Image (tube, grey):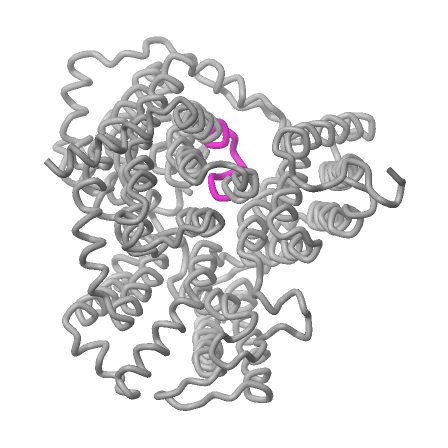
Amino acid sequence: MDLIHNLGIGLGVAFQPANILYCFIGALLGTVIGVLPGIGPLATIAMLLPLTFGFDPVASLIMLAGIYYGSQYGGSTTAILINLPGESSSAVTTLDGYQMAKQGRGGIALAASALGSFFAGTIATILIAVFAKPLSGMALSFGPAEYFSLLTLGLVSSIALASGSVLKAISMVCFGLLMGLTGTDIYSGMPRFTFGAQDLLDGLDFVAIAVGVFGISEILRNLEHVDATKPIVHKITSLWPGKEDLKRMVAPAIRGTAIGSVLGVLPGGGALLSSFVAYNVEKKVSKQSDQFGKGVIEGVVAPESANNAGAQTSFIPMLTLGIPSNAVMALMIGAMMIHGIVPGPNVITKTPDLFWGLIASMWVGNAMLIILNLPLIGIWVSLLRVPYTILFPAITAFCCVGVYSVNGNAFGVYEIAISGVLGYLLVKLECEPAPFILGFILGPMLEEYLRRTLIISNGDMSVFVTRPLSASLLLITVAALIFMMLPSIAKKRSEVFVED
Amino acid sequence: MVLNRKDAAASLFFIGVGLLYGSIILSKLPIGQVTEMGPGFFPIVLSSALILLGGIGLLKSFSSGPGTLFGKFAWRPVITITAGIVFFGAVLSGLGMLLTVFGTAVISSAASPALKARSAVLIGLAISVFCVLIFILALRLPIPVIGAWIGN
């Protein structure tokens, strides 16, 4: 069997002692930042990106990936214990998880979330292994028109991720696309929007912008209300779910995994959207939907399985098509490029040990996370007592060091300050940064594919709809856009995001 | 009729960006044709879209209910954190890692009024020593511990 053979290669790589160590460091860091509110996987990966310069590429990707899925585990811990989602993808877990904690069933909720996540992680790993090869095969037949349509779909689905008005989210995408075009135009060699600055000829620094928009503006938001009130942590009694609980976990875990796996693959999808959808589906199919929000185990298992599955399958478009489905994946692409690996359909064939090693390490990392999160839960709870007054100056300094070390000039550091303040202002105006950053990353690619398509077709716009693959991608895009604009959905969206 | 100031401000921002970038494109960048797109083609589409979307948003903000502009605004953190970051960029090559990180941490920690000067200095010291250990000793980033201004 090809699959088993490939997974064998992967496990061989993942089980090398050094890689196990990096996987562990990643999972550990991920858990820590997941537990600590105010610092997310994106800012962490951006800060640590430069540190991985000296690593072997496989090791650095394994570690960065560990941070990402580790943060999903850590984020749910705080969601359950103190009603504060460490990560936005755990926001929906607070609904039932915290209620369970209040009823003294916090330990069971934690176990349910960890086991659900592990199950989802295992399945998602297998799915990546199964689908990666055919998908990258298909990607080889993609022309520029297909890529353009795929990117458009990604941008539109990122709108679904943003809370608040669809109009603002679309505007943020366009704003991001425009900012992404800063720098020298590769076709004409003309500088665009550089305002005469030499440093802008290579474009705005993505790491600096990401760190500013997510890291710094998050600090500013947190500092609006620094109150010294210590969070109330509910006592954890038993960690092990009983037979009845286990039985109730099976179906939601499977449904959550399925939803997460599908939505994770969609560009713009990933963990956040998956958890919301899984929760709502679970509520719909449940015979006791009125109990949701009052502490049912299904309301914890389903979204937690879904966000972990989604976090993992979001690697599929990145690894096979070279397209980032969310901002974290964009950073991963950045990490690969630093090591001279161009993400895309050739990764599997050219660097099989990297590809399969990364996938296998995700499974290994998920297993480590169970151990990290359940028996060691006490450590993470005590981490919640670290005062934010120590954290935020440290995060600010780390952001600066990280960005400076990427390109070694002060300009990038100033970009952090500007994008941080601008990001904060926009958040205050209820404009979410996620669509902006995706637009920023995809802007140059989108323009490039549009240009190439129209050169090949001799200016004929109809190729986008006459090529079947491109047409179907665009059809999905339009359907998604209409779907989001429907008044009833718009209302649902605002309900869902109220909890955020 | 109540103007939703939040929505109106966001819309005006997008319109402003659209107009600014649009005028740059029209004055400097050739747009070209569909068959051979110039450097201004895609940007002009985007800036027009921004103006259009902002315009729709502005119209809607008259009917979307009340909304305050910013509400609670973190003035103090915005100033101190920005100052801390700019300080870092400005002096790192001259002062080196140790003092720069110390300064950045102390300046930015002024964002929290609850933090006393003494604890700010202690936190700053801890962070700067930590950064030197991790980034320079462990990870060997090519940044001097003590910069050229102070001498080696």
Q: Nearer the viewer, residue A413 or A387?
A: A413
> If the image is split into quadrants, where does the C terminus of chain A sit?
top left
Residue range highlighted in magenta: A32-44
Magenta stretch, overall SS: helix
Question: Residue A166, can we see it?
Answer: yes
Number of on-image labels: 0
Q: Along the horizontal axis of the image, is B29 left or right of B81?
A: left
In this picture, is A300 found above or below B144?
above
What residue is shown at x 61% (from left), y 69% (from top)?
A: A201
**Is B103 contained in the magenta span?**
no
Q: Residue furthest left?
A: A1
Q: Nearer the viewer, residue A298 or A365?
A: A365
Q: Quadrant of residue B99?
A: top right
What residue is shown at x 52% (from left), y 42% (from top)?
A: A49
**Is A41 contained in the magenta span?**
yes
What residue is shown at x 28% (from left), y 32% (from top)?
A: A360
Question: Residue A292, can we see it?
Answer: no
* Residue A276: percent from left, percent from top: 30, 43
In this picture, is A361 found above or below A146?
above
Q: Quadrant of residue B147?
A: top right
* Residue A190: percent from left, percent from top: 56, 80
In this picture, is A171 found above or below A216?
below
Q: Nearer the viewer, residue A160 or A485?
A: A160
Q: Along the horizontal axis of the image, is B125 left or right of A473?
A: right
* Residue A364: percent from left, percent from top: 31, 26
